[in-house]
Image: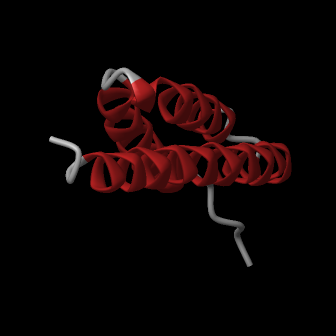
Amino acid sequence: MDILWPYIAAIVGSLVVLFVFIVVAAVFLRRSFTILSAKTGVNMFSTAGLLTLIGAVLTIIGVGFILLWFAQILLAVAFFSIKTQSA
């Protein structure tokens, strides 16, 4: 069992670093979706950004993956809800 401890520590350390990067990426996504929501007038972008951030934080317990999936679906709906400008 003493042989496995360095590998377990490396895996746990890698997962912690991955979690931090996911949360930081979600913060930047939230900021960009909020700006996109303000520019287009489609508030679903802001909601999708919030769901992405909450989902990223909750990935540590596993529930966040479901929220991230719903956020991506909501993001697709928001993109199709953008009104086109008439020329």
In the displayed structure, would residue 12 be above or below residue 85?
Answer: above
| Residue drawn at the location 59% of the way across and 34% of the way down | 44
Quadrant of the image for the N terminus? top left
- The quarter of the picture where residue 53 lies is top right
Quadrant of the image for the C terminus? bottom right
Specify whether residue 81 is in view: no
Q: Residue 13 at x, y = what percent?
A: 49, 49
Pick the front one: 76 or 29: 29
- The quarter of the picture where residue 64 lies is top left
Side of 42 relative to 68 (left or right): right
Q: Residue furthest front?
A: 2
Q: Residue 34 at x, y = what percent?
A: 78, 42
Pick the front one: 82 or 71: 71
| Residue drawn at the location 40% of the way across and 37% of the way down | 68
Pick the front one: 47 or 2: 2
| Residue drawn at the location 65% of the way across and 54% of the way down | 25
Q: Residue 56 at x, y = what percent?
A: 52, 36
Give the number of callouts.
0
Side of 31 relative to 14 (left or right): right
